[in-house]
Image (spheres, rainbow, N blue to C red):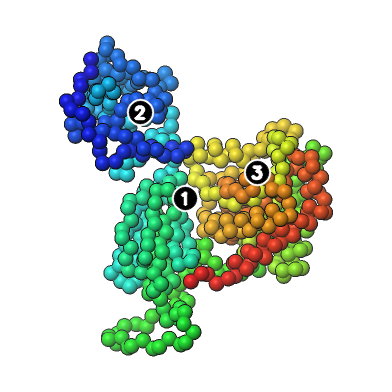
Amino acid sequence: MLASGHAQGTAPASPLTLVTRDGRRPVPTTILNNQEFIALDDLASMFQLAVREDALAGGVTVSYKGRTIVASADQPMASVNGRVVTLPAPVARIGRRLFVPIDFIARALAPVYDSPIDLRRASRLLVVGAIRVARVVVSIDAAGPPTRASVEVTPALLVSSMFDAGRVIVRVEADMLDAAPPPAPAGLIDQIQAGNQTTTIAFALSARAGMPRVSTTTTTESTRVTIEIPPVAPSQDTSAAPAPQPAPPPLAAVPPAPPAADAVPALPGQRTAKLQTMVIDPGHGGGDAGVRGPKGALEKQVTLEVARRLKRLIETRLGVRVILTREEDRAVSPDERDAIANNNKADLFLSVHVNGAPSPAVKGAQVYYLRLDRAGEDARLRTAASELVLPAVGGGMRPIDVIPWDLAQAAHVDVSSRFASMLEEELEKHAPMGPRPLQQAPIRVLSGVNMPAALIEIGYLTNAEQEQAVQSAELQGGLAQAIFDAIVRFRTYLEAPAAP
Ligand SMILES: [Zn+2]
């Protein structure tokens, strides 16, 4: 027997939002006797549960993969695989449907469920699976100038920021943001965007804003980004005429402002660089041959040929110094490759590979830049790894090095994505493109370089036609030209003054 609710339930202000890897959807709840309840049939369809009323047990039996929860109809408790947990209320019936308090999710269901379940009451999110949700709170202090904004990210996660086209963009390395509604824009900030649909928070600055200064502090609990926005300095005035002398300050003791140039540290990702040195990384080498084609072509040989060709072209025609991570057929570790680029203070890094696929039909070029991942998130890593494990011809699997996350490349991911897009666009003109020609992936060799970086798979060596083509002067020449053109475009982008 189940007690019936005295009254129809009333709907709360907003439904819960179920968040999974596949997306999000609303889940209705209902208020009954001041408690929030969720329908058991809704839970059953979300979590693949079997629900059965059990008169003998005096409640409801909920089964999941052979694990059992018995929720009592007259006591505010449930037995979870034999262990008793308390609930704010017993199972309730409204009409023909059965309801449980929403605490049932965390206290009874989560302990038996295969994936993590996180009910975030404040933001009304029901997060299922290994999804990194970052709580983000934005605050503004407009008492200045300067105007100060802060972004508090909980838990402490990797955060990068950039200043582009009058906007400060803070990017959180999470799967989704649980962002509190941002405060109203004030001071030198015209607009704030902090949505749950993206993992960035954008601050559009006023035309009266000078160069912002961004700093990040991290504690074990959270990461805080502080943005200090001064008013535009006379030296940054867009008018060509010399700025008039400001009126003398009322107090003689006011110290002079430091020169604007010294006051502005470079933001991560900000374009201030020149393209003087480039590192080209021919994939594999030595005992690591990489992919082997059906006729015996080796990835390590093709990558070295293409890299040498590129080096000649770029050095003679662009006057850019090009360093190869290997000049001959020898094994080089990913760390060593990264160190060569970092120690030479390269301005750009390009790793060259040839792909392999189980199906001999797959062909075409692809460009990758780094996706930052976090260690310890098993499901996420498994997904990443499975995307990147390639069957080696001749048996076995060939894992591409996957690492969880790394700080070196983090500051450059935005600029790297620009370079990768340019590569993809230029390659399209000269070579067949593969499935998903532009991709983000957690690639070990890219993660440790402290400069814009991309990786190109020039084709599929496992495709007989491409095995021949990637060794030909014709395709190699076309690829080299495409990469060269992309580098010329990137240099123009890199050396252009940052947008006002
Ligand atoms: Zn490779």
Looking at the rendered structure, the kind of residue marked 3 is: Pro
Q: Is residue 408 visible?
A: no
Q: Residue at x 46, y 87 (%)?
A: 242
Q: Nearer the viewer, mark 1 or mark 2?
A: 2
The residue where tag 1 is placed is 173
Looking at the rendered structure, the kind of residue marked 1 is: Glu
Q: Nearer the viewer, residue 362 or 339?
A: 362
Q: Is mark 1 within 8 Å of ligand 1?
A: no
Q: Looking at the rendered structure, which numbered label has been put on residue 435?
A: 3
Label 3–label 2 contact, CB within 8 A: no
- Circle 3 packing at 10 Å, graded few (<14), some (14-19), many (20+), is few
Is tag 1's residue or tag 2's residue first in the polypeptide sequence?
Answer: 2
Q: Secondary structure at mark 1?
A: loop
- Circle 1 packing at 10 Å, graded few (<14), some (14-19), many (20+), is many
Looking at the rendered structure, the kind of residue marked 2 is: Asp
Q: Nearer the viewer, mark 3 or mark 1?
A: 3
The residue where tag 2 is placed is 42
Q: Secondary structure at mark 2?
A: helix
Q: Residue at x 31, y 58 (%)?
A: 183
Vertical comparison of 380 with 457: above or below: above
Is tag 3's residue or tag 1's residue first in the polypeptide sequence?
Answer: 1
Label 3–label 1 contact, CB within 8 A: no
